[in-house]
Image (cartoon, helix red, strand yellow):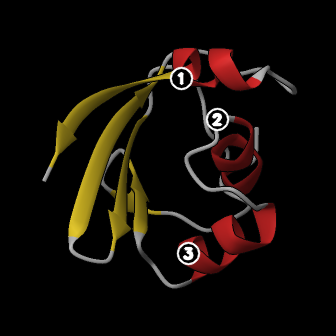
């Protein structure tokens, strides 16, 4: 699954266009490598997302095309929040 689509489906970022902008600015890494919006996300990958002063590290648990709002957090686990 594309990175921008995963971020939208998991509701870490509200809109796919915003997810694309954040990725293109170089504020997201997948397993330590800088990611673009079209980068492929797999189960078990570690994502580090920079939100201004906040840095969020998550691990991808599952991939689904659509998910209900209350089940969105089950797609990932938060490892670290700084």
Quarter of the C terminus within the rendering: bottom left
* Pointer 3 local density, CA inside 10 Å: few below 14, some 14–19, many at least 20: many
Image position of 57 with respect to 70: above or below: below
Q: What residue appears at the point 30 percent right and 53 percent down from the top-left corner? A: 32
Q: Position of residue 63 (x, y in %)?
A: 70, 21
Which of the 4 quarters of the picture holds residue 50? Answer: bottom left
2 and 1 marks in contact (CB < 8 Å): yes
* Pointer 2 local density, CA inside 10 Å: few below 14, some 14–19, many at least 20: many
Q: Secondary structure at mark 3?
A: helix
- The residue tagged 1 is 73
Alpha carbon distance from label 3 to label 1: 20 Å
3 and 1 marks in contact (CB < 8 Å): no
Image position of 42 with respect to 12: above or below: above
Q: Position of residue 15 (x, y in %)?
A: 76, 61
Q: Secondary structure at mark 2?
A: loop
Alpha carbon distance from label 2 to label 3: 15 Å
Task: Select label 2 or label 3 by which is in front.
Answer: 2
- The residue tagged 3 is 22
- The residue tagged 2 is 10
Judging depth in this view, the residue of 7 and 3 nearest the camera is: 7
Chain-order first, disc 2 or disc 3: 2
Q: Position of residue 5 (x, y in %)?
A: 77, 48
Chain-order first, disc 3 or disc 1: 3
Which of the 4 quarters of the picture holds residue 43? Answer: top right
């Amino acid at each position: 699954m594309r990175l921008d689509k995963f971020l939208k489906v998991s509701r870490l970022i509200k809109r796919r266009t915003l997810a694309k902008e954040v990725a293109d600015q170089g504020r997201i890494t997948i397993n330590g490598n800088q990611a673009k919006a079209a980068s492929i996300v797999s189960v078990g990958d570690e994502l580090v997302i920079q939100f201004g002063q906040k840095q969020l590290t998550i691990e991808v648990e599952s991939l689904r095309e659509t998910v209900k709002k209350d089940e969105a957090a089950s797609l990932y686990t938060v490892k670290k929040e700084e």
